[in-house]
Image (cartoon, rainbow, N blue to C red):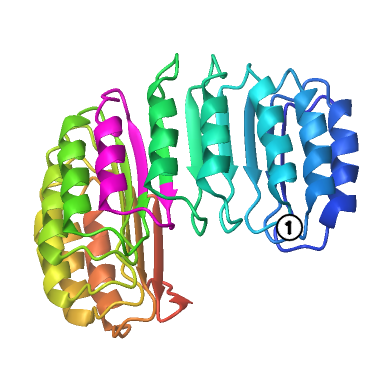
Amino acid sequence: IQLQSVSLSLSGTEVRDAGVQAIAERLPELKRLQSVSLHLADTGVGNTGAKALADVLRDSRQLQCISLGLRNILADDSGFQAIIEALREMKQLHSVSLDLSCNEVTDTRTKALAEGLCDFQQLRRVCLDFSGDAITDMGAQAIIDRLRALKHPSHRASCLMDNDVTDAGVLAISARLRELPQLQLLSLGLRTRGVSDTGAEAVAEMLSGLVELKSIALDLLGTQVSEAAVQSLIERIRGLQHLQSLSLDLSRDQASDFRVQILATMLCEFKQLKSISLDLSSTEVSDTGVIALVEGLRQLKQLQSISLDLSHTSTSHFWVHTLDDALGDFKQLQAICLNSAGEHLPLVG
């Protein structure tokens, strides 16, 4: 088989160590393989499976892109260390995506991975997920420091924090990211109650310096950020002339109809946007706020993709008719995803 790319999603299955070992034994047979994506979240994989995977990766000199989903597995320090050491030997990698969320990853593990990033001479894309781990400001800063030192500056940065990161850590991270003016894609998750308006203001200031950004994803779930700080963030985003994609996760916060109406007013000026995704699930938003939001989106006739998540809110299906009426204005629309009250809604027109 002359496959160059393999993607396997086994999350939530019972593959365990034996299954991973079987997969690892077959991968070397794919001599032209350049890209591997393995999603093994919640599979019960432990040290044996992790080390078997590490061994085969270490010998895969032709691989250029790798994505490992290792959320909530049973490996301990030795298993994770084996994978990190294997990755460090794969100096030919162009792209690395690593999901280590919900594994009690500490600053020590994070620093080991961060130091390994410097060995990747060809690396151009990095995506790291440490949500639900035990990383503090120190570990988060170590990762960003290493990203800044890459020989080939990345055009993409993804950082998801659901840990013990505080405003101090966000300030340090924002300062480092601002030194990467070539960034075109930024995904920043601040899922921690340790982040307040101080951290949000630092992010806003950082965004104003990243003038090449084309795509932004901000996740403020569970933070202590006020409406004024969110408004300041959006103001800074609005000033980015090259922005084409915007994703805002405001779920489970104090988002109200008033906040959504302000957001709708500001969105009217995003004339260059092609894609927008808004997650307002589990908030206090009602039909009043959503209708205002739809009217705001209606001004963005150039949109190609719209995604709205209003599940577990006070909305009814009434607002869908408002959106249905507006669809004729979106001449370039190619994709739309609506979720309300836990249901995916069909459109009339």
Q: Does the segment drawn in magenta span residue 22?
A: no
Which quadrant of the rendered structure holds the N terminus? Answer: top right
Q: Give 205 or 273, whichever is nearer the viewer.
A: 205
Q: Residues within 10 Å of mark 1 (few under 14, many from 20)?
A: many
Measured along the vertical axis of the image, is residue 243 above or below residue 312?
A: above
Q: Where's residue 283, x and y in %?
A: 29, 77
Residue occupying the point 39% across, 50% down: 334
Q: Give 1 or 10, whichever is nearer the viewer.
A: 10
Residue 204 position by quadrant = top left
Residue 262 position by quadrant = bottom left
Residue 336 as seen in the image, left or right of residue 291: right
Q: Where's residue 42, x and y in %?
A: 69, 61
The residue that mark 1 highlights is: 74
Label total for image: 1
Residue 221 position by quadrant = bottom left
Measured along the vertical axis of the image, is residue 6 above or below residue 326?
A: above
| Identity, as a three-letter code, of the amino acid under mark 1 | Leu
Residue 242 as seen in the image, left or right of residue 346: left
Q: Is residue 338 visible?
A: yes
Q: Is residue 300 visible?
A: no
Residue occupying the point 71% across, 63% down: 12
Which quadrant of the rendered structure holds the C terminus? Answer: bottom left
Label 1 sits on a secondary structure element that is: loop
The magenta region covers 160-188
Q: Where's residue 187, x and y in %?
A: 37, 44
Q: Give 289 or 295, whichever is nearer the viewer.
A: 289
Residue 238 as seen in the image, left or right of residue 214: left
